[in-house]
Amino acid sequence: MAFLSLFFHVILLLVCPTTLAENQTDHLALLAIKSSITDDPQHVLDSWNTSLHFCQWQGVTCGRRHPRLTKLDLGSRGLVGSLSPQIGNLSFLRVLRLENNIFKGVIPPQVGNLFRLRKLILINNSFEGEVPASLSNCTRLNVLGLARNKLSGKLPQQLSSLVNLMIITIHNNGFMGVGL
Ligand SMILES: *[C@@H]1O[C@H](CO)[C@@H](O)[C@H](O)[C@H]1NC(C)=O
Ligand SMILES: *[C@@H]1O[C@H](CO)[C@@H](O)[C@H](O)[C@H]1NC(C)=O
Ligand SMILES: *[C@@H]1O[C@H](CO)[C@@H](O)[C@H](O)[C@H]1NC(C)=O
Ligand SMILES: *[C@@H]1O[C@H](CO)[C@@H](O)[C@H](O)[C@H]1NC(C)=O
Ligand SMILES: *[C@@H]1O[C@H](CO)[C@@H](O)[C@H](O)[C@H]1NC(C)=O
C-alpha cells in the first residue's frame, strides 16, 4: 500500500509538476493591476474573479505548458486608471497591449524587470512623465508603441541598446528635442 501511494505520488509529480507548485505571483500581480483600474465600462474585469483560474480571465493568455501569464491584452476596452507597478512581477510576460484606453500616471519603471517582453503597446493613453530608462533591460523588445500619450522629457539614451527593436512610435507626446 505504501509503495502504491508513493508510486501514485511520483506519477502525479511527473504529470503535473506545475499544479503542485502553483505559483501565485501572477495571480497577485493581476489583482493589483485590476485594483488600480478605476473604470471598466465594458465590464472586462468582471471575469477576473475567483470562480475562474486567472489563465481564463479576459485579456489573459498563459503559456501552453505552465500556468504563467505570457500575454496581457487589454487594448480598446475603455479602461480608466493607472498601471500598477506590480506589472513588473509578471516575469513570463512577452506581450503587453493597453492601447486606446485612458491609463494615466507614469509607466512604472518595474516594466524593466520584464526581460522576456517583446511587445509593449501603450499607444493612445494618458501616460505621463518620462519613459523609464529601465526599459533598456527589456533586451528582447521588438515593438515599442508610445505614440499619443502625455510623455515628456528626453527619450532615455539607454534605449539605443535595444538591438532587437524593430518598430518604435513616439509621435504626439511632449518629448524634448524630438522633431516628431
Ligand atoms: C514564482 O515566480 C517568481 C518569478 O517567476 C519567483 O521569483 C518566485 O520565487 C516563484 N515563487 C514560488 C513559490 O515558486
Ligand atoms: C466570474 O466570471 C464569469 C465569466 O465572466 C462569470 O460567468 C461568473 O458569473 C463570475 N462569477 C462571479 C462570482 O462573479
Ligand atoms: C510585486 O512587486 C512589488 C512592487 O514592484 C513588490 O513590492 C512585491 O513584493 C512583489 N510581490 C510579489 C508577490 O512578488
Ligand atoms: C483613442 O482612444 C480612445 C479611447 O480612450 C478612442 O475613443 C479613440 O478613438 C482612440 N483614438 C484613435 C486615433 O484610435
Ligand atoms: C537593468 O538591470 C540591472 C540589473 O537588475 C540594474 O542594475 C540596472 O540598473 C538596470 N538598468 C536600468 C537602466 O534601469
Image: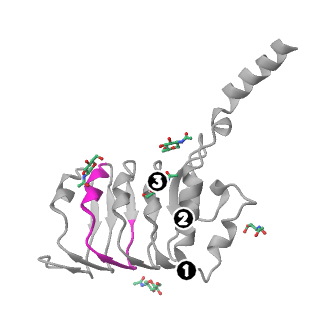
The crowding category of the residue bearing disc 2, from other C-alpha atoms within 10 Å (few below 14, some 14 to 19, many at least 20), is some
Secondary structure beneath dot 3 equals helix
Quadrant (top left/top right/bottom left/bottom right) for the C terminus: bottom left
Mark 3 or mark 1: name the one nearer the start of the chain: 1
Q: On the image, numbered disc 3 is attached to which residue?
A: 89
Asked whether the viewer can see residue 77, the reply is no
Secondary structure beneath dot 1 equals strand
Is residue 177 found left or right of 145 in the rendered image? left
Q: Amino acid at mark 3?
A: Asn
The circle drawn on residue 90 is none
Mark 2 or mark 1: name the one nearer the start of the chain: 2
For the residues labelled 2 and 3, say whether their Cβ atoms are less than 8 Å apart.
no
The crowding category of the residue bearing disc 1, from other C-alpha atoms within 10 Å (few below 14, some 14 to 19, many at least 20), is few
Relative image position of residue 140 (x, y in whole percent): 33, 49
Point out the stretch of residues depicted in magenta.
121-139
Quadrant (top left/top right/bottom left/bottom right) for the N terminus: top right
Relative image position of residue 26 (x, y in whole percent): 55, 53
Please name the residue shown 57% across and 57% down the image: 28
Q: On the image, numbered disc 1 is attached to which residue?
A: 38
Q: Nearer the viewer, residue 115 or 30?
A: 30
Asked whether the viewer can see residue 37, the reply is yes
For the residues labelled 3 and 1, say whether their Cβ atoms are less than 8 Å apart.
no
- Label 2 CB less than 8 angstroms from ligand 3: yes
Residue 53: quadrant of the picture = bottom right
The circle drawn on residue 32 is 2
Q: Amino acid at mark 2?
A: Ala
